[in-house]
Amino acid sequence: MKELRIGLVGTGNIGRTHIERINQRLQGGRVIACADANFDFCKTVAEQYGLDAYQRGEDMISSNDIDAVIVATLDPFHEQYVRAAIQAGKYVFCEKPLAPEAEACKRIVEAEITGGKHLVQVGFMRRYDPGYRQLKGLLASGKYGLPLMLHCAHRNYDAPGFTTPMSVENSMIHEIDVLRWLLNENYATVEVVFPKSTRHAEGDLRDPQIMYLTTESGVRIDVESFVNCRYGYDIKCEIVCEEASLNLPEPPNAMIRTNDSRMTPICHDWSERFIDAYNIELQEWINFCKNGHLTGPNAWDGYVGQVTAKAASKARDTQSVVRIELESMPDFYKK
Ligand SMILES: NC(=O)c1ccc[n+]([C@@H]2O[C@H](COP(=O)([O-])OP(=O)(O)OC[C@H]3O[C@@H](n4cnc5c(N)ncnc54)[C@H](O)[C@@H]3O)[C@@H](O)[C@H]2O)c1
Ligand SMILES: O[C@H]1[C@H](O)[C@@H](O)[C@H](O)[C@@H](O)[C@H]1O
């Protein structure tokens, strides 16, 4: 295959950044078509980037002009397009979460198994972030003893329209996935507690929230989600091991001395903070689609994430510690 011809559904914020990175920076693939429920906007995006515009995502996905699909719509609409891609036998990269509900993720898993081919990759881009990859390498080296505790924070400058469940399902889902990948084990229990809420939280939103996870081997994790922190985009991860504390590196920035102070700027949002991770994940996805072998986060990882998120929702609503019940991984995903 010369160039992977990609159709993208969902031309919003991240959809457009993916079009730009694939068509202007990455190799071996090209977004040639797009679709969006807001068709007028979709046409302006198509015109800007020289793409074909489709009113219905399903029509684009089944078109013979398309080899592979990217889904970047709002979360509740991922399932319909991922399943349309599976139906058409096409590789599909779905932005996280695979779907907001565990049941929807399970339907995707079942459809993929029925189709008999690994087609789905989930946009858990932190697995590709050079900093998290360093942490994974340090843990694997065995030099620092076993991990015992993790202290994490996930802060967004703001999050218009966010609801209390979204802090887990849409935001902390990144930690749920990347920490399971880092530690190479599943979770056993989850609890969610609420500190005092910020005055910047809209409507009924409880913000910040703290999620406590324990893994099957007993590692204890705390993750703070603060989606209206109002100072920037800040992602922290400290892994306390038997003989060391391992810390996620921050993107480098020059320190500025000015106005009687020292200042080091930080990122404003995810698009700056994880730019390398997005580039690496999509370049690898294009390469793997072309040689017919996906290795990134799969539909089962997406499902496990939402089973954990569902347990977290129950823990939040009941203010109790909830056991995470996960069936064993199907053989299909062990290959
Ligand atoms: N990996 C990351 O760090 C990251 C970062 C940002 C967003 N995301 C994910 O990407 C997705 C999009 O987020 P965003 O910030 O770009 O949102 P956005 O609101 O900017 O864009 C969403 C787009 O989906 C379109 N849409 C809504 N319903 C649709 C439907 N039924 N069919 C087709 N199109 C539909 C909207 O018209 C809009 O253009 C979300 O799932 C989000 O969780 C991931
Ligand atoms: O909390 C946000 C995360 O920090 C980003 O990485 C995106 O996933 C975005 O969709 C979330 O709302």
Image: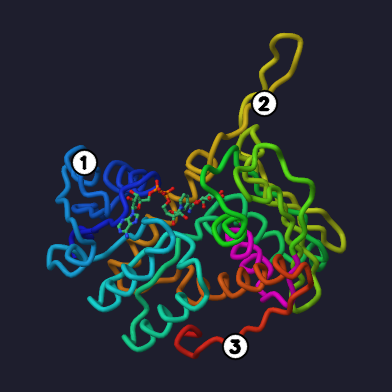
- Give the residue at x 17% y 47%: 51
- How would you classify the magenta stretch by its main secondary structure? helix
Q: Is residue 254 magenta?
A: no
- Give the residue at x 45% y 75%: 104
Q: Position of residue 275 (x, y in %)?
A: 47, 43
Q: Position of residue 127 (x, y in %)?
A: 55, 59
Colour approach in the figure:
rainbow
Q: Is residue 276 above or below residue 266?
A: below
- Give the residue at x 69% y 22%: 263
Q: What mark, if any, has residue 49 been given in the picture?
A: 1
* Residue 46 location, quadrant: top left
Tag 3 residue? 327
Q: Give the amino acid at mark 3.
A: Glu
Tag 2 residue? 264
Choose between 186 and 310: the one closer to the eye: 310
Q: Position of residue 152 (x, y in %)?
A: 72, 53
Q: Are the residues flagged by discs 1 and 2 in contact, CB closer than 8 Å?
A: no
* Residue 251 location, quadrant: top right
Q: Secondary structure at mark 3?
A: loop
Q: Position of residue 282 (x, y in %)?
A: 39, 56
Choose between 173 and 21: the one closer to the eye: 173
Q: Residues within 10 Å of mark 2 (few under 14, many from 20)?
A: few
Q: Give the amino acid at mark 2.
A: Thr
Q: Give the amino acid at mark 1.
A: Tyr
Q: Earlier in the sequence, mark 3 or mark 1?
A: 1
